[in-house]
Amino acid sequence: MPALSRYIRTNTPYEIALIATARATSNRRGGLRASAIRTTNLVTGRRMLRKNITLALLVIMSASCGADTDVTVLRVLHPHDGTHPVHHALVFMDERLQELSGGSMRVDIYTSAQLGSERESVELLQLGSLAMTKISTSILDGFAPSFRVFGLPFLFRDDAHRLAVMEGPIGRELLTSLTPFRLRGLTYYDAGARSFYLASKEVNTPADLAGLKIRTQESAMAIRMVSALGGSPTPMAFGEVYTAMQQGVVDGAENNPPSFYLTRHYEVSDYYVLDEHTAVPDILLISLPVWERLTPQQQAWVQRAADESAEYQKELWREATEEALREVQAAGVQIIRPDKAPFRAAVEPLLASFRDDPTTAALIRAIEEVE
Ligand code: GCU
């Protein structure tokens, strides 16, 4: 197989300038301060308050994580609750890391986006203020454009194809392609396939989505995908979806069965339409500045614990998906298994435009060729 870097898009001058600015700001003012300045411009009201609490927490936490302690603690943030397969995988990673390192390293887990949204957590990693985060690869659209490809609808033929891409040379090369963004991918966690759920409108075909406000991830690809299917995309952070559905700010959203169930979004949904339009993997990221401070031996332990946690998460995922579908149905959600053909047809022009785009064409072809 030819060098994969051929398939992976390099940074545009604009992106290089953005990284340079982030570095310069970070060097001038110190990581936390720079993060405060950049993010307060983006947030208001309740989010500003949460941001201030976050920063206060981080100050306390970084003060407790010095070279004077014998244990190297890696703090990880994820947006789920303590029953999600990703959480169990991170607990497993912590246990393995403690074993491998003879107790000299451990992982501290912060759930339900306690320290900020997924996008904000990536910014904290870039500044070295947080060690690790588990996000959806959709969020990387805005950082590393090659990852847009994972958000393309109906890209993967089936579960086996998706796992072969993630675990094979393409997936691995993408993990390390994040270095220019001061990030390093450690591993992927399976996130199954995403489908629509609606508060009260029954959807059987893309035509039924017309005019409906659908929450999307904060990702350009997710927005384009919902538009292509006829919906009206409304991007927002994961943690805001329940209230948005309850209050009718959106008519629906889309996610995989475990997230639909464990977030309790099913409580405010009448229909779950299993069109399985995308299969966007989750990714465990480590801050490059933090990674570079670890010794080669510590890096090897962290990588091994992460790889093993992904194997474990894969086993949990299948079971969690079946349980979620069973439970939401028992709670009264109507599960619709629509004909996928009209959904595929509606997004074909979107796929074609990415197949023709020189920045993504080779990567898409390489993914499609994976057996
Ligand atoms: C999935 C994914 C999350 C993401 C969420 C979303 O549940 O695991 O990381 O936040 O989708 O829709 O935003």
Image: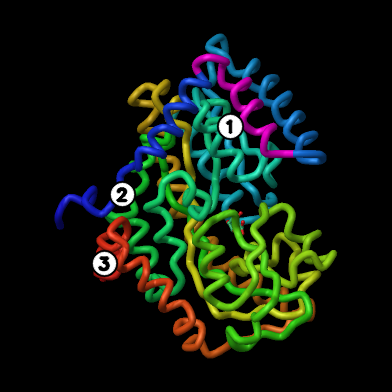
Which one is nearer the viewer's eye here, 5 or 264? Answer: 5
Residue 229 at least partly seen = yes
- The residue that disc 1 covers is 75
**For the point 17% across and 50% down, which residue is it?**
3
- The answer to which of marks 2 and 3 sits earlier in the sequence is 2
Q: Position of residue 231 (x, y in %)?
A: 63, 74
- Viewer-nearest of labels 1 and 3? 3
Residue 98 as seen in the image, left or right of residue 353: right
Assess disc 3: are there few (<14), some (14-19) or many (≥20) residues with their C-alpha within 10 Å of its C-alpha: few
Marking on residue 9 = 2
Assess disc 2: are there few (<14), some (14-19) or many (≥20) residues with their C-alpha within 10 Å of its C-alpha: some
Question: What is the distance, in whole Å, between disc 1 and disc 3 at their CAs?
Answer: 37 Å
Which one is nearer the viewer's eye here, 30 or 129? Answer: 30
Q: Which residue type does callout 1 highlight?
A: Arg
- The residue that disc 3 covers is 365
Quadrant in the picture for the N terminus: bottom left
Q: Does residue 39 belong to the magenta stretch?
A: yes
In the rendered image, the residue lying farthest to the front is 14
Quarter of image, ligand 1: bottom right
- What range is drawn magenta here? 27-43
